[in-house]
Each structure stands twice: as C-alpha cells, then as structure tokens.
Amino acid sequence: MALVRFVWNEATGFVFTREFTKRGCHYQHEGGSASHPNGWMTRDPNSEDWILWDIERKRTMRLSDQAPKSEPWKPSEESLAEFLSLAEEYNNWLEAPNKSSET
C-alpha cells in the first residue's frame, strides 16, 4: 500500500507541477508564512507585479515590482485559473521576441 500511495502522490504531484512549469512559473520558497508564502511565481503581464500561487492557502498573492524584499505579499482576488492565464500570457510575451528572431 505504501508503494501505491507513493506512486500516486508522485504522479499527481507531477501533473499539478506541470500546470505551472509549462506556463513558465518558478517555485519560490519564501518561508511559508502568510506574508511570505511558498508557491509558484511569475509576473502579471498587465502590471509587472510579481504574482504567486500560495500552495498552502490556495490563493493568489501579489507583490509590487519595486517592493523591498521585506515587504509582505498581499492577497489578490484571482482564482487559480486566472493565475494560470496570467502566467501563460506573460510566458507568451517572453517567448514572442524569440519566435520573431527565428523567422
């Protein structure tokens, strides 16, 4: 049973992680507190804020681009689907110059 549980956890973890990595998110280890959460981080293509999916609290967090390291992350209203959409938009924006230089 332990082996089955391990394999199941690894498989589901890979699938969940893939949703973030294919959109260019990076895992950020901030410490795990509510103001400095751990989670998947990228940028908002519309505002250049850093956005983070807090994996423990299952919510989106934001931090201004110009904020000092000690400033706490602030909760945001975006759902996981909205977070992933923003991440994908930002990733596509990053890849656009590379695609135009290849042609």
Image: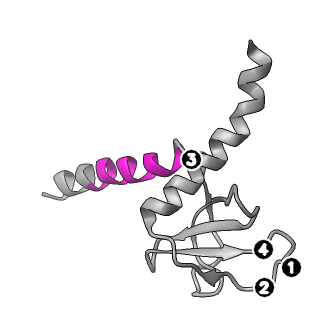
Q: Which residue is mark 4?
A: 64
* First reached walking from the N terminus: tag 4 or tag 3: 4
Disc 2/disc 3 C-alpha distance (Å): 26 Å
Residue linked to disc 2:
71
- The crowding category of the residue bearing disc 2, from other C-alpha atoms within 10 Å (few below 14, some 14 to 19, many at least 20), is few
Residue 97 figure quarter: top right
Check if mark 3's residue and mark 1's residue have beta carbons within 8 Å: no
Graded by Cα atoms within 10 Å as few (under 14), some (14 to 19) or many (20 or more), the crowding at tag 3 reads many
Q: What span is colored magenta in the figure? A: 9-21
What residue is shown with label 1?
A: 68
| Outermost residue toward the top in this view | 103
Location of the N terminus by quadrant is: bottom left
Task: Check disc 4 and report its element: helix, strand or loop.
Answer: loop
Mark 2 or mark 3, which is nearer to you? 3
Does the magenta-highlighted stretch encompass residue 33?
no
> Dot 3 corresponds to which residue?
88
Left or right position of 98 against 55? right
Residue 26 percent across, percent down from the top left: 62, 54
From mark 2 to mark 1, how far is it between C-alphas?
Answer: 6 Å
